[in-house]
Amino acid sequence: MTNRAKIYHFTKKENLEAIFRDGLRPGTKYATLGSKLREGANYFWLTPDNDLMGYLGDENYICLEIEIDAGFCKVANMDISSASFVNFIAAKNGEALCDYAELSRMYDSTAVDYASYKSGHFRSPEVIVQTIIPPNDIKTVQYIDLSNAYSNNLQLYNAHLSQKFARLNAEKIRLVARHDDSTGILESYLTNDTNEFFTIQLNKGG
């Protein structure tokens, strides 16, 4: 029996007619910055509550639930992609904190299979799909249930981070990006010894 995954996507309401006619086709409007995983990809959430783009609760957007073979799904760390992008922009002015291409490679290499993902592993897990999703595998979600296994992802990540990096000092980490999402201002770091990536939230968004 095929292992099926339920994943979620926010789209503007005006896109619904085309989506239910043509499905969701591979293709990204975002810069891939050298990432092979992001080439020709669509992006989803493990649960609507994982949305860090500010679409949840926006009346102009509607949530779609997609049921798909889990083998088509990779879970990647969106914070790494965001860090890569801000360094790509900063590099144009000679102000990059890190090589954006290095971060893009890390984004690809740290992605995991859908079945392997454990809640809290990434602060901002995004599900990458590089295949067409037909209309009959898509439905709108009128009532968003936030009680699935991944709804506590952010809380678990922050709890793990607090324990894991409590004793790290400034000599053991290096800042690689200042960026943001719907939760507020973020800073991302790499550890100097193991080159491990992590992100902290500096303040809460409005």
Image: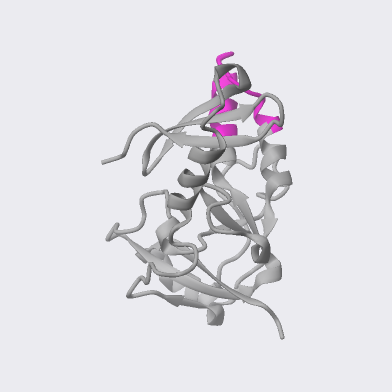
Q: Indicate whether 127 appears above or below 171.
A: below
Q: Residue 183, how many percent across, how many down?
A: 36, 43
In the rendered image, which quarter contains the N terminus? Answer: bottom right
**Front-most of residues 122 and 84:** 122
Q: Is residue 129 at all visible to an observer of this figure?
A: no
Q: Indicate whether 24 appears above or below 206.
A: below
Which quadrant of the view contains residue 115?
Answer: bottom right
Q: Residue 81, how many percent across, how many down?
A: 59, 40
Q: Residue 93, how many percent across, how many down?
A: 55, 15
Q: How many marks?
A: 0
Would residue 87 be counted in the magenta stretch? Answer: yes
Q: Is residue 131 at all visible to an observer of this figure?
A: yes
Which quadrant of the view contains residue 142?
Answer: bottom left
Q: Residue furthest top?
A: 94
Residue visible at 70% across and 50% down? 37
Q: Residue furthest bottom?
A: 1
Q: Indicate whether 22 appears above or below 76.
A: below
Q: Which residues are magenta?
A: 83-102
Q: Indicate whether 90 appears above or below 28.
A: above
Which quadrant of the view contains residue 5?
Answer: bottom right
Q: Residue 125, how many percent across, how many down?
A: 55, 52
Rendering colour mode: one colour
Residue visible at 62% across and 35% down? 197
**Front-most of residues 23 and 171:** 171
Residue visible at 34% across and 34% down? 203
In the rendered image, which quarter contains the C terminus? Answer: top left
Q: Magenta region, mostly helix, strand or loop?
A: helix
